[in-house]
Image (cartoon, coloured by chain):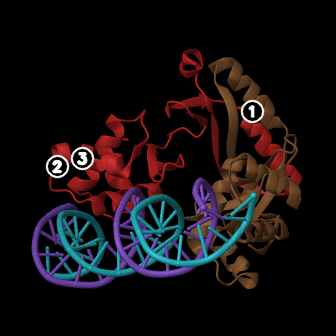
Chain colours: A red, B brown, C purple, D cyan
Amino acid sequence: MNAAQFKEKLKQKGCKLTLQRRSVLDVLIKHCNEHLSTEEIYDFVKENYPEIGLATVYRTVQLFEEMGIVDRLNFDDGCSRFELSSEDTVHHHHHLICESCNKVFEVENDLLEEIEKEIERKYKFKIHDHNVMFYGVCKDCEQKE
Amino acid sequence: MNAAQFKEKLKQKGCKLTLQRRSVLDVLIKHCNEHLSTEEIYDFVKENYPEIGLATVYRTVQLFEEMGIVDRLNFDDGCSRFELSSEDTVHHHHHLICESCNKVFEVENDLLEEIEKEIERKYKFKIHDHNVMFYGVCKDCEQKE
DNA sequence: CTACATGCAAAGACTTTGCACATGG
DNA sequence: CCATGTGCAAAGTCTTTGCATGTAG
């Protein structure tokens, strides 16, 4: 996602390219392998742009979600978290959450597509999206115990 | 889950069998194929037990979750929802959410176990639980469009 | 009798909204 | 210029907590 593409996407929605929106996108790009909460994005943006308001960050991530720029994740920790959408639709990944250290791991797996195909066939339900989370204990924590 | 089993489980946790807890359990049993929110449970309990407080329902479902009596579900609709835990560990089911009518459908599928085995092997991550949600359009809504 | 449970209201956490002011195109 | 965006504070929603009172065992 470069500046020109970003501006074009905004324009399609009748939205303006503001410094605030640009700053939020920059933070998301810089931390693309984390899963930042709105509050965390806010804190990072403030480093370069101290005047920004938290409400603006909330409005921005909501806009980005509608634009398909980010995915909203729910790790049941009381707040929404965000990651940049994978640009290629092929790259499917799920999340493993360690119940001991609370770290989140990413996992690639294509078997889910088979499940989706089976569900679509058996239940005549057209699947657009999914949310898959596995809870357990990671390698490191397993060793410590 | 009968009254005696319930009382025994409570006793194991050092908890008492109160009319409030019994009432919440009754509502959950009566509505076992719905996914009630705390507020909805509260409203149903009030039909037979008008003095109950909402905070008690919150405390009760939390206790039931710890006891393994209910599972907490997250449909991203702003509140936790609950269903009785399947007593047999074999009965795995997932949820389909129709983005058009917001109905929730249950789906049985064993393929997920294969995915879990693969993940455990490849990532050395011991899986205890999962949360799987598919979003899309159900049969009925598909026809209407 | 006493540890546990309840009801109520207050407080908390996250998120949205109303409004006056600012600004991108 | 004017529609759109922003910052701030206030309000909203779901949930938890403190405390005096009630009650199961």
Residue appearing at x 74%, y 53% in the figure: B10
> Does residue A128 appear anywhere in the picture?
no
Q: Badge 2 is on which residue?
A: A49
Mark 1, secondary structure of its residue: helix
* Marks 1/3 same chain: yes
For the residues labelled 2 and 3, the Cα–Cα distance comes to: 6 Å
Give residue B96's position: percent from left, percent from top.
74, 56
The chain containing the residue under callout 3 comes to A
Q: Look at label 1 and name its amino acid.
A: Leu
Asked if marks 2 and 3 touch (Cβ < 8 Å), the reply is yes
In the picture, which quadrant includes the C terminus of chain B? bottom right
Quick one: label 2 or label 1, which is nearer the N terminus?
A: 2
Q: Badge 1 is on which residue?
A: A111
Q: Look at label 2 and name its amino acid.
A: Tyr
Mark 3, secondary structure of its residue: helix
The chain containing the residue under callout 1 comes to A
> Does residue B133 appear anywhere in the picture?
yes
Crowd around label 3: few <14 · some 14–19 · many ≥20 (10 Å): many
Q: Is residue A124 left or right of residue A37?
A: right
Instruction: Using the image, tell me which numbered label, if any, was put on residue A45.
Output: 3
Q: Is residue B61 left or right of residue A99?
A: right
In the picture, which quadrant includes the N terminus of chain B? bottom right
Crowd around label 2: few <14 · some 14–19 · many ≥20 (10 Å): some
Answer with the quarter of the image where residue C2 lies.
bottom right
> Mark 1 or mark 3: which is in front?
3
Q: Is residue D12 left or right of residue A128?
A: left
Quick one: label 1 or label 3, which is nearer the N terminus?
A: 3
Return the residue nearer the eye: D9 or A121: D9
